[in-house]
Image: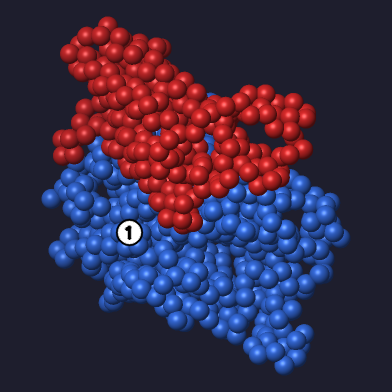
Amino acid sequence: MEIPYTVQPRPDTGLYNAKVGIWLFLASEVMLFGALFSSYILLRVGAPEGYWPHGWLNVPVGTCNTLVLITSSITTVMAWASLKMNQFNRFKFYHACTICLALAFVCIKSYEYHDKFTHYEIILNNGHILDGHLRESTPDHVVISGHAVEDPKELYDLHAVKNPPKHEEITVLRSDIKKMERYGPWHNTYLAIYFTLTGLHALHVIGGALVIGFLWGPGSKLWHTDPERFTNRIEISGLFWHFVDLVWIFLFPVLYLL
Amino acid sequence: MQATTQALPHAAPHEAHHEEAGFWSQYIFSTDHKVIGLQYGITALGFLFFGFCLMLMMRWQIAHPGEPVPLVGPWLASSLGKMAVNGVVSPDLYNSFGAMHGTIMVFLAIVPLAFAAFGNYLVPLQIGAPDMAFPRVNMASYQFYVLGGVIMFFSFFIPGGAAQAGWTSYPPLALAIPTDGQTFWLIGMVFLITSSLLGAVNFIATVIQLRAPGMTWMRLPFFVWAQFVTAFLLLLAFPPLEAAGVMQLMDKVAHTSFFLPTGLAPVGQLANVSGGGSPLLWQHLFWFLAHPEVYVLILPAMGIVAEIIANNTRKPIWGYKSLVYAVLTIGFLSFIVWAHHMYLTGMGTRIATFFQTTTMIISIPSVIILTCMFISLWGGSIRFNTPMLFVMAFLPMFGIGGLTGLPLGFSSSDLHLHDTYYVIAHFHYIVAPGTIFALFAGIYYWFPKATGRMMSEFWGKVHFWTSLIFMNLIFQPMFAQGMAGMLRRMADGGANYSAAKVPGAIGGLSQGMLGLHTYILWAAVGLGLAQIPFIINFFWSISNGRPTNSDNPWQATTLEWQTPTPPPHGNFAQVPVVYRGPYEYSVPGHATDFTPQNQPG
């Protein structure tokens, strides 16, 4: 006895097995990201007045990445629709676009990560704070391109800052530094949840791109022997891809705009 | 009916292909749900034994603080080094054993046995399916489980030993302990969560998609319903713990402060972290999983109990529809009771009232299920074989466990009982003489289906009566200890809080209460000895037990008994068609006292 409904839908549910499977999997993914978003809310509500960062991320870059992912969702649908219309070459083209867009997303995200990892907050012995990107680092001094503030609160709400401070090269002696810390996940809870959420999302993007890449490359041989099953696989991987896209649609305003 | 029990024709291409499979693909990397079910079962029984051994060593340490563990002491000293100098369980090692006993019993023993092993073996058979919906995902699920188990097991032997912060892993404690045990725990948990996620998706898809023709929802055996709801609990409750695990791992490895508050000074010195995190966040995320997890532990057991009661009373189970709706209600409500584990965190009275209310409401469907089981016995001509004995014991034992939970569900009485031995006695009554008894019943009941041989009834009864007595001797005194104020998780068993040590202190523990430790220790040893008949019976019967006289030795109605024994790859020779409900026993006017689901007419 063979397993039924692997390709054809079961009449009373109207679904084939894998489609039930992927929807269930996505339900659990909703709970996974839901828990992280809830944590975000709890951490943000629990932060002391004036110490939750606003405007720390580059909105144009984020918008660009949002557009990249949305476009990739469109090409994913087109790829599936092409198969439905029996146009294998158009499928190849559209999913090639999907994979390239996924790579573009990861590259842009890495650029943003890199920007954060070269961004330093330096607390001086006299209580002043320097904030900016590291330009040079030697055993006795460091050079950053940034600005100095007296109240740490000035660094948090960048939306409220009307005139952005001019960035200049500042050289500071190591002996004057009390504490120097990168904008990594350990810097504060905002960056912690930022790196965790976007990191987990990026892993989903990479995983999805690997699956779609496999189906685009060696996996596409199935088209010639069992086209219906292959089309189902493209649909399933597409559903996952749309979910990954959807997560970003929530991530972007929550982390970049609010 | 007869048509489906014939052996598969060997000329069938699928079967022929399978026969060529070697040892590795047939037993280790198998995609057959029955083999995977047995793999899960054997591995989980191994972990059950391991978790029990940890507990025995802890009981020795509680009863005889600072004395070397007999028999295994030298081995402990040589393999664990500083943690067990001269074979004495150090407080650190005690904490480690405590944390790992809980983790192993819940995540590596009971859930894999109740859900993955019984579910894998039986659900496809009972719904008339050839296999699970995704056989390879099923295999991956087992492999992830083994990997998680191996990581957990090896964490005992790393420097500093395994995790020490309890199975609940509350931060900041979990993060303040400067060893790597917690990191191993978190990574192990991620594998185990992945495993149960894959399993849950597979179970639900299988039940939705692969039911045989005529197997409508209300014709599903109650066991399938119980597994179906359990799968949903695992699917939706585990991801928040995975998220929490990832965040704690970030705290541990990337030095973030998700769960570390500002101003934390674990060793009298300000911790070098940013702060701003919330330890309560972990508790919410943890219990959001861990309360549904309680029902993951009990629902499959209830499913097994329903099957065995119907079979051995030769009567339909009473109130099938009530059972189904009750189990669905439990599934839903179990997601909104979690904070009753957290009354002592200083939550507002309104929130406490909400969670008290939902907790009291969820006891209603639980009582409905238990009541249906009891009424099912009414007027039955009961066959008292070994599975039925275990089931008959399950009912009152689960009753004790459930009813003693009510005082814990009220925030006012919980203030006194929280974190005491009362809590331990309460949930062990549910899981040990409750779930584990149901699992034993299931093993004795379905053993003939998997092997074609019966287990010995005599040794089964010896196993049952001794286990029943020792279980109660172990857990009953803990209620008294807990109400006297004895806290759990104390390596010396509370000797430091005794009236003898601190004369005149209010609420000091009496010598009588402390003396119960010795008594519990020997009861626990007795329980261990009581398992020897089972272990021997189990392995001996695989090849030497009395062969079954037919494919359906218990004369049951459900579909798993209408297959060849043991069922071949693909289960049924042809698609079974279901004509009736699962419990048509003693139908008036019928020739036999059971009517299989696939019998037409």
Tell me where residue A198 sits by quadrant.
top left
Coloring basis for residues:
by chain
Q: Residue at x 81, y 63 (%)?
A: B88
Where residue A186 sits: x, y (%)? 59, 42
SS class, disc 1? helix
Compare residues A59 and B599 and report the one nearer the observer: A59
Q: Is residue B294 visible?
A: yes
Q: State whether residue B580 is above or below residue B154.
A: below
Name the amino acid type tagged 1: Gly
Graded by Cα atoms within 10 Å as few (under 14), some (14 to 19) or many (20 or more), the crowding at tag 1 reads: many
Q: State whether residue B535 is above or below residue B253.
A: below
How many marks the image carries: the answer is: 1
Tell me where residue A84 sits by quadrant.
top left
Compare residues A172 and B193 and report the one nearer the observer: A172
Where residue B327 sits: x, y (%)? 30, 61
Compare residues B443 and A196 and report the one nearer the observer: A196
Q: Relative to residue B509, is residue B391 drawn left or right?
A: left
Tell me where residue B365 sits by quadrant.
bottom left
Q: Residue at x 60, y 49 (%)?
A: B274
**Split into 4 quadrants, where in the image is the N terminus of chain B?**
top left
Q: Relative to residue B159, is residue A40 drawn left or right?
A: left
Give the colour of chain A: red
| Residue at the right extreme of this rendering | B86
Chain letter, blue in picture? B
Where residue B329 sits: x, y (%)? 28, 62
| Residue at the bottom extreme of this rendering | B504
Q: Relative to residue B591, is residue B79 drawn left or right?
A: right
Q: Which residue is mark 1?
A: B331
Q: Residue at x 44, y 70 (%)?
A: B347
Q: State whether residue B460 is above or below residue B496.
A: above
Output the chain of dot 1.
B
Q: State whether residue A209 is above or below residue B180.
A: above
